[in-house]
C-alpha cells in the first residue's frame, strides 16, 4: 500500500517538474518577446507624409572561425532565432516603411571565404526576411569589410558586400527623403545628385559615429551633404550627439524623444546624430534594442525598442536544471531511506517471532 502511494507521488512530482519546465520554456522562448513589447512606446503618425524607420545596428551574426567549440552550432542557432523573433515583433509593432541596417551585419564578413560568406548572407536574409518590406538601406561595418584599427580593406570585400546588400538600396524615398551612405573606414560617402539635395530631408547613415570624431570626413559631410539627421552604430551604445556643442546624451529610457530638425539646423546651427544600440545579446551589453524613428516633415520622433536580455533567460535554464537535480537527489534520499529502515524492522520482527524450542 505504501509502495503504491509513493509511486503515485513520484508520478505526480515528475509530471509537475515536466509541466513547470515546459512553462519556463514557453516563457523564455515565446512569451518574453511579447513582455518586452509591452514596454515599447508607440509613435502615432499625425500627417499623411509620415515615414517610419526601423533602425538595426550590429546584429553581427556569428561565424564559424572565431568559435570552434562543441557548443558553437547551438550558439549560432540561438542567436539567429533571437534576432529573428525580435525582428518579427519590432516589424509587427512599428509597421516600418524603411528598414535601415547600420553595419556589422556579419561578425566574420571581413575574413570569410567566398563559400562561408554566402552561407552567412543566406542566414542573414533568412533572419530578416519579410516580403512586404522591400525598402531597405545597408551600410557596411568594419566586421563586414574590414577597417577596424587600420585593418586593410580589400576591394573584393567591398564588392561582395555591395553585390549582396547594397545593389537595390534606397537613395530617395517618396520624393521627400534622401539617404546618404557614409563610410568612415574609407572616408567616403555617396552623393550622386548634389544639385537636388536642398529639396529633400537629408539623412546620413553610417556605421561609425561622425559628430563625435571630427576630422576631414565630418567637414566634408557637413559641407557637401548638410544632413538634417545622422544615424550610426558601432559602439553598441544608445546615445545622442549634438554638434558643435559636443553634448552627449545617454539614452536608455523607454521614452520618446522629439526633435525639430529644421529649427535645430536653421536656428541653432547644430547637427544631430543618434547612435542606435546593438540588437545582439552577444555583444556583452545589458541594454540591447532597435531604434524606431518617425519623420513627419522636419519633425523627428525617436525611441528604442528594448529587447530582453537573452543571457538572463539562458541562466534561468541552468538554475532550473540545478534545482531539479537537487530536488531529485533529496527526494530519492527521503523516499529510499525509510524503506530500508522499515525493511530491517520487519525482518527483525519476523526473526523475533520465531518460536524458541
Image (cartoon, helix red, strand yellow):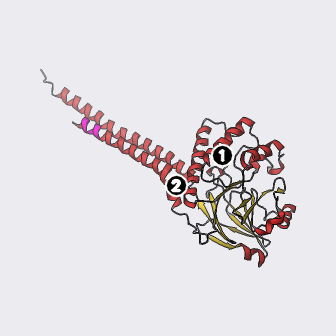
Q: Position of residue 215 (x, y in %)?
A: 86, 63
Is most of the magenta stretch helix, strand or loop?
helix
For label 1, the crowd category at 10 Å Cα-Cα, with few meaning under 14, some 14 to 19 and many 20 or more, is many
The residue indicated by pointer 1 is 61
At a point 55% along the width and 57% down the height, the residue shown is 92
The quarter of the displayed image where residue 13 is located: top left
Disc 2 from disc 1: Cα separation: 19 Å
SS under mark 2: helix
Answer whether residue 270 is magenta in the image.
no
Residue 55 is at least partly visible in this image: no
Looking at the image, do the residues carrying marks 2 and 1 touch, with CB atoms under 8 Å apart?
A: no
Q: Which residues are magenta?
A: 3-8
Residue 189 has which mark?
Answer: none
Q: Quadrant of the N terminus?
A: top left
Residue lying farthest front?
Answer: 175
For label 2, the crowd category at 10 Å Cα-Cα, with few meaning under 14, some 14 to 19 and many 20 or more, is some
The residue indicated by pointer 2 is 33
SS under mark 1: loop
Q: Quadrant of the C terminus?
A: top left
- Looking at the picture, does residue 139 appear above or below residue 42? above
The quarter of the displayed image where residue 337 is located: top left
Amino acid at each position: 500500500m505504501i509502495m503504491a502511494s509513493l509511486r503515485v507521488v513520484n508520478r505526480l512530482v515528475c509530471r509537475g517538474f515536466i509541466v513547470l519546465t515546459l512553462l519556463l520554456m514557453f516563457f523564455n522562448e515565446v512569451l518574453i518577446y511579447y513582455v518586452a513589447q509591452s514596454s515599447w512606446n508607440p509613435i502615432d503618425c499625425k500627417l499623411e507624409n509620415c515615414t517610419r524607420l526601423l533602425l538595426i545596428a550590429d546584429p553581427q551574426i556569428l561565424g564559424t572561425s572565431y568559435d570552434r567549440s562543441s557548443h558553437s552550432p547551438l550558439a549560432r542557432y540561438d542567436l539567429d532565432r533571437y534576432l529573428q523573433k525580435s525582428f518579427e515583433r519590432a516589424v509587427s509593432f512599428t509597421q516600418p516603411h524603411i528598414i535601415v541596417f547600420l553595419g556589422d551585419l556579419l561578425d566574420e564578413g571581413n575574413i570569410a571565404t567566398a563559400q562561408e560568406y554566402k552561407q552567412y548572407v543566406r542566414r542573414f536574409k533568412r533572419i530578416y526576411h519579410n516580403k512586404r518590406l522591400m525598402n531597405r538601406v545597408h551600410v557596411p561595418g568594419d566586421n563586414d569589410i574590414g577597417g577596424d584599427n587600420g585593418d586593410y580593406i580589400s576591394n573584393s570585400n567591398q564588392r561582395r558586400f555591395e553585390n549582396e546588400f547594397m545593389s537595390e538600396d534606397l537613395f530617395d524615398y517618396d520624393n521627400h527623403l534622401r539617404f546618404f551612405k557614409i563610410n568612415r573606414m574609407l572616408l567616403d560617402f555617396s552623393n550622386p545628385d548634389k544639385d537636388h539635395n536642398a529639396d529633400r530631408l537629408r539623412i546620413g547613415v553610417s556605421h561609425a559615429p561622425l559628430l563625435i570624431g571630427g576630422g576631414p570626413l565630418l567637414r566634408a559631410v557637413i559641407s557637401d551633404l548638410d544632413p538634417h539627421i545622422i544615424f550610426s552604430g558601432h559602439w553598441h551604445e544608445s546615445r545622442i550627439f549634438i554638434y558643435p556643442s559636443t553634448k552627449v546624451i545617454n539614452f536608455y529610457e523607454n521614452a520618446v524623444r522629439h526633435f525639430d530638425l529644421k529649427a535645430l539646423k536653421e536656428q541653432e546651427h547644430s547637427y544631430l546624430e543618434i547612435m542606435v544600440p546593438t540588437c545582439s545579446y552577444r555583444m556583452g551589453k545589458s541594454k540591447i534594442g532597435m531604434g524606431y524613428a518617425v519623420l513627419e516633415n522636419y519633425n523627428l520622433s525617436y525611441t528604442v525598442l528594448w529587447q530582453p536580455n537573452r543571457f538572463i533567460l539562458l541562466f534561468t535554464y541552468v538554475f532550473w536544471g540545478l534545482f531539479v537535480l537537487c530536488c531529485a537527489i533529496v527526494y530519492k534520499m527521503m523516499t529510499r531511506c525509510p524503506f530500508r529502515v522499515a525493511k530491517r524492522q520487519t525482518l527483525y520482527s519476523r526473526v523475533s517471532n520465531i518460536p524458541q524450542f
